[in-house]
Image (cartoon, coloured by chain):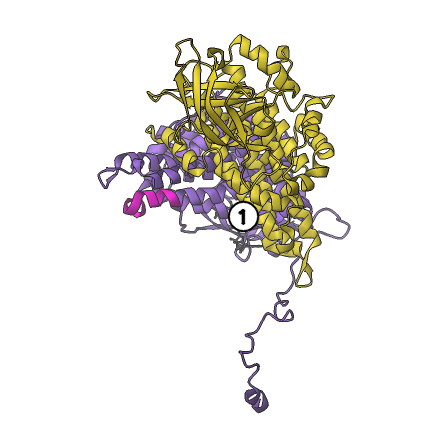
Chain colours: A yellow, B purple
Amino acid sequence: MEIPHFPIGEWARELADRVVEPTVADRDRERRWNPRLFAELAEARPGPSLTGPLVPRDLGGAGLSATQTVALLAGLGEGARDPGLALAVGVHAVLATVPLRAFGSPWQRERYLPRMASGEWVGALSLQQTQGASMAPAVTARPAADGSGGWVLTGELDLVAGAPVAHHFLVVAAHDDGGRTAFVVDRATPRLRVGEAGPAAMPTCPWGRLVLGGCAVPDTAVLGTVAGAATEVEPLLAVLDWVFSSAPWLGLIRALTRDAIEGARERRLFGRPLHHDQSVRFTLADLAARCELAEGMLHRAAQQFDSGHRPSHQDAAAARLFVAAAVRTVTDAAARLSGPLGLTGDRLVGRAHRDGLFFAGTGGGTEVLRPVIAASLLELG
Amino acid sequence: MTSTTSAYDPAGTTSAYGSAGTTSPYNMTDTGSTYGMTGVASGTRAAPAFPGIAARAAQTDATGRIPAQNWKELADSGYLRLFHPPEIGGTGADGLTQADAMEALARACPGTYWAATVSALLCGKLISTYGDLRSHEPLLRSLLSGERLAAFAVVERTAGSDAGTYRTTVRRAGAPGGGFVINGEKSRITNAPIADVAVVLARRERLPGDDGPDWCLAFVDLHQPGIERYEIAHMGLRGMPWGGIVFTDAHIAEADVVPVPFGELAEGMAWGWLKNSLAAIAVAESALSASVRHARERVSFGRPLAHMEGVQAQLAESRAQIDAARLLARRAMCERVAGRSARDLIAMLKIYATEMGVEVAARAVQIHGATGVTQGHEVERLYRDAQMNVIGGFTSNRLREQVAESLGLGPAVYSAFDWVTPAGLGQDPAGLDGLPYAEEAVS
Ligand SMILES: Cc1cc2nc3c(=O)[nH]c(=O)nc-3n(C[C@H](O)[C@H](O)[C@H](O)COP(=O)(O)OP(=O)(O)OC[C@H]3O[C@@H](n4cnc5c(N)ncnc54)[C@H](O)[C@@H]3O)c2cc1C
């Protein structure tokens, strides 16, 4: 069957297959980030760069639509077969970029966006901070003591994707009165430290812990309105994570499904090819269906960004809930069909099984996504 | 009525189901996207657009009869015309409009939806695709106006999925008038008890020198000697007429037998899979709506169920699953309306959507507690209806075989189940002390 692709996704798939995929097993084993790969993805021509798809053209970006960006990231996931690297690219190019585009002052937009689009500056943030304040605030912001303006940020954030290579961080900090403000904090800020720490999953993403030991930042570091994060950056960041961090997985489950089909043709059991087994055939048919269904959910959520209206947070959460479940279904089945020998880190199915579980826990996991969806349904919450 | 032209000439039509309206109430704008969901959706979708039919849904189920008023409202609404171009009396709605209208009617009353959609959409497409407009335009127009009702008769008593066993046969009449006669029995057919005409899949008797296909579609007038019918009581979709037709030398005009290669069957059936999928989505949406309502009203442990995370989780899962199915249905419908086959996409949709419908309906029954298993309650009815969508028009597993083949896994391979014992896994093992020698020696 022809698996349909958007042309832009096809372009990214071929690029990633050529540039990223050949070294994925080694980088995974060695937990290594290769800046040259990132640069190649940024500079690849002809075509949009993978580092600035959503940066407007006049600021040096590709000026793609949200739908095209989902296709681009899905292509990256499918071609690279590298969930960690795809996550790092998505965090930089979407999660750290779009809040600046949407809420940045002219100065902030002109300072950060062109250099982020070119890949010169990497933006990072903590995956703990993409679900609003559903987790207890880990960073506090107090007005600078001398009354000269500016803020002092204190706290620690884990799961910071891109931390070791970042030029700046998007941080949401809580005030003593409970209000929250978003900041863009440059790495060069005194008393800012990046510690070594990361999850066992997605080792090809550069992970770190961000330690803010009373960092003084100027007022120009505030992103959006002071105490406005709860209605500005936080809801946007949540929806961006739900939709765009899921996009590489659309490509990954397509790749896994294709691998599983090939595997079933090669393996033999009871003296017969595995693909003669009806339960195997049925499973593969269901996996192919999951890919189509997941694509529809992501496409709708992305399209809402392009519609000129406010994107529905319920639809974005539903998309993440569905894609995360599809990832579990596909990775489980693909792992089962590949047999116990297939689960090494040298094979996508082994990596995806480990990373898919991690993915399902991010974006808040089911314990955040379900109440978010239910709140809309029930008009409560 | 001569035997060389179609039996469905305009002069012969009588109105059994009221007259047809001329405009469609579904003038929703096309968003230009196959997903067509650019707007912000919140809460469950809008209320049914067929209020009268919806208000009678419980009664339709309880009596097992579609009220005459439903047929009239259907014809007046323009629903039956949506699926076809103006040349044959249709209104040529776009894919999303068709999908929305189907879902709206299925939300109002799944039984009525099935009966109407089998006739206007499925049979209409079969006749317009395989028939000849010159002879069959009057027949098509009568289906679209609601004057006539059609059934699509494929399955027989002995077999459903396994088409190789179908026996109903069309052969030359040989009598002075010419034409054909049909013999056999079709069973478990939607609309069979009341339909005016049946599109019948039958074997073709081939005379020497005829190297056409083995199969044909025959458009059979059901108001003639040689036709007997019976009803079959059924679990869900009770309002939908369902039963069998026995053909004993029933007559068919020359123009009403269309030879078709067997492979074409799935192509035509795909319209039916879309019909089942939208029915499943609508049943699920109704079940979710009822669940949301109940969760907000029912107080347990001092608070409405809506405040319990366990209930919220069930509602959220249903919401995501229904959305996924609907988005795929809309995409598939647009593909199909644009003239592409999308057969495998629709097969995947049918599998997922219909099984999802059962899951969501079962959750709804759980959320309703004993209320949900009380006869006559809406979710009890939906629960029974949901299961019907899975089986009708190719079962899930039959479709999984089709999808698997399209994925490059080759055709289904059936072999006798005899490989476990030779592999040494078909017997209980020896115990810790090996095989008991004494027993072995005795035997
Ligand atoms: C609501 C409803 C409406 C219907 N309307 C019509 C109609 O309008 N016209 C019409 O012709 N028919 C109609 N039918 C009949 C329907 O098409 C058949 O019931 C269906 O095709 C399955 O056939 P069966 O019931 O004989 O089941 P079987 O074919 O006997 O199947 C029984 C079980 O075995 C499984 N199975 C069968 N073959 C395979 C295989 N190769 N591999 C794995 N598993 C397999 C099936 O999935 C199923 O679970 C309708 C049925 C329903 C429920």
In this figure, which residue is indicated by the disc labeled 1?
A: B396
Q: Residue furthest bottom?
A: B442
* Element carrying mark 1: helix
Q: In the image, what residue occupies the spot 58% across and 54% down? A: A279
Residue B36: say if magenta.
Answer: no
- Is residue B160 at least partly visible in the picture? yes
Q: Quadrant of residue B11?
A: top right
Above or below — where is A57 with respect to A67? above
- Tell me if the residue at label 1 has its CB under 8 Å from ligand 1: yes
Residue B365: say if magenta.
Answer: yes
Q: What is the chain letter for disc 1?
A: B
Q: In the image, what residue occupies the spot 46% across and 17% down? A: A216
Quadrant for the C terminus of chain B in the image: bottom right
Q: Quadrant of residue A327?
A: top right
Q: Given the image, on which type of amino acid does mark 1 rest?
A: Ser
* Residue A135 shown left or right of residue A341 in the figure: left
Q: Residue furthest right?
A: B209
Q: Residue furthest left?
A: B302
Q: Position of residue B276 (x, y in %)?
A: 50, 40
Segment tinted magenta in the rendering: B362-373
Q: In the image, what residue occupies the spot 51% across and 28% down? A: A210
Task: Tell which of B12 and B146 is nearer to you.
Answer: B146
Above or below — where is B387 with respect to B66? below
Task: Tell which of B44 and A339 is nearer to you.
Answer: A339
Q: Quadrant of residue B306?
A: top left
